[in-house]
Image (tube, rainbow, N blue to C red):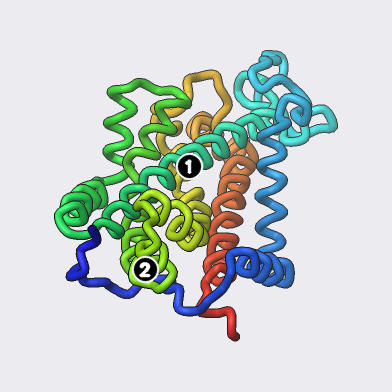
Amino acid sequence: MLNKFTLVPKAPWPVDQVITQENLYKRAWRLLRSDPVALLSLTIITILIISALFAPWIAPYDPNEQMLAKPLSQPSSQHWLGTDEFGRDILSRLIFGARISMSVALGSQFIVSIIGFWMGLIAGYMGGKVDRVISFIIQIFASFPYLLFAMALIFVLGPGLLNLFLALGLLSWAGTARVVRVQVMSLKHREFVDASWMMGASHYWIMTKHLFPNVLPSLIVLATMGIPNAIIAEASLSYLGLGVRIPTASWGQMIFAAKPFLQTFPLYSIATGVLMMLSVLAFNLLGDRLRDALDPRLSGR
């Protein structure tokens, strides 16, 4: 039974207006379409995802094909961004590197959303001792030095794509859980939840059919705004040699490899850095716009 004495803090995105999920998403899409920054960010993200999905067909060369006769060659009609120290086409490696960055970012945020949602949902819904125990666990994970512990975990598990998913996902769900917990504590006292409870609905039914749809907009926003952090974390770990295994193309590895040639061939570093910066900026800007568009408090403005 719910603990009716649990204190309910104010949710960061309170649901204080009756808005159907369908109308909420239609409204969000309408606002995004009218926002040039959101459209530009969405365009950049779409290009990145398409490039990642269809990298073998888009990239002009195999990313690991070495042309030792052309090391550090300048941009040309054959190699638009030149070649690296092993004669590998930089543009092709950037495209395949996008596949690694996007897959790690999206995969880790999927893990974060699943764990954060269920931990926050159970804590906020059940209250009492369950809430105190889960809140203590959330506090422990929230206090971890995120990147340092990810480095330690990958050092134990070994480098690799799957281990990147696990390390970044298992160590960064606490923020999502906190937001979900606060929202559920506010939602569980609303009339539609009380009505379902009195009609004999099970806890699982209430959590999945009533609470989840109302928390989903916040999960979308949190996941979108968490992707830039995952991109930077993956690049940082790959830069330190704890990411994907060589010679797999990765933006972090490319930045590390380009460091000795910063003065003689700056385009090598600049191209990789600019692409990573655009990716992070696009997701951050889109996350900001989604937060505003999916916030029910703005519906009457």
Q: As drawn, which residue projects farthest toward the right?
A: 77
The amino acid type found where label 2 is placed reads Asp
Relative to 58, 206 lies left or right: left
* Residue nearest the viewer, comparing 66 with 219: 219
All told, the count of numbered labels is 2
Residue 73 higher or lower than 265, as above or below: above
Relative to 205, 25 lies left or right: right
Q: Position of residue 145 (x, y in %)?
A: 26, 46
* Residue nearest the viewer, comparing 242 with 28: 28
Q: Position of residue 128 (x, y in %)?
A: 17, 59
Q: Is residue 143 visible?
A: no
Question: Which quarter of the rendering shows the N terminus?
Answer: bottom left
To which quarter of the image does residue 22 belong? Answer: bottom right
First-in-chain label (1 vs 2): 1
Question: Which quarter of the rendering shows the C terminus?
Answer: bottom right
Relative to 151, 234 lies left or right: right
* Residue nearest the viewer, comparing 275 with 21: 21
Give SS at disc 2: helix
Q: Look at 34% across and 38% down and name the residue there.
A: 170
To which quarter of the image does residue 152 belong? Answer: top left
Q: Look at 60% across and 44% down and name the residue there.
A: 270
Q: Is residue 113 visible?
A: yes
Q: What crowding class fits label 1: few (fewer than 14 Cα within 10 Å), some (14-19), or many (20 or more)?
A: some
Q: Look at 40% across and 68% down and name the residue there.
A: 195
The residue that label 2 is drawn on is 194
The amino acid type found where label 1 is placed reads Phe
Gap in angstroms between the C-alphas marked 1 and 2 = 31 Å
The residue that label 1 is drawn on is 110
Q: Position of residue 130 (x, y in %)?
A: 19, 52
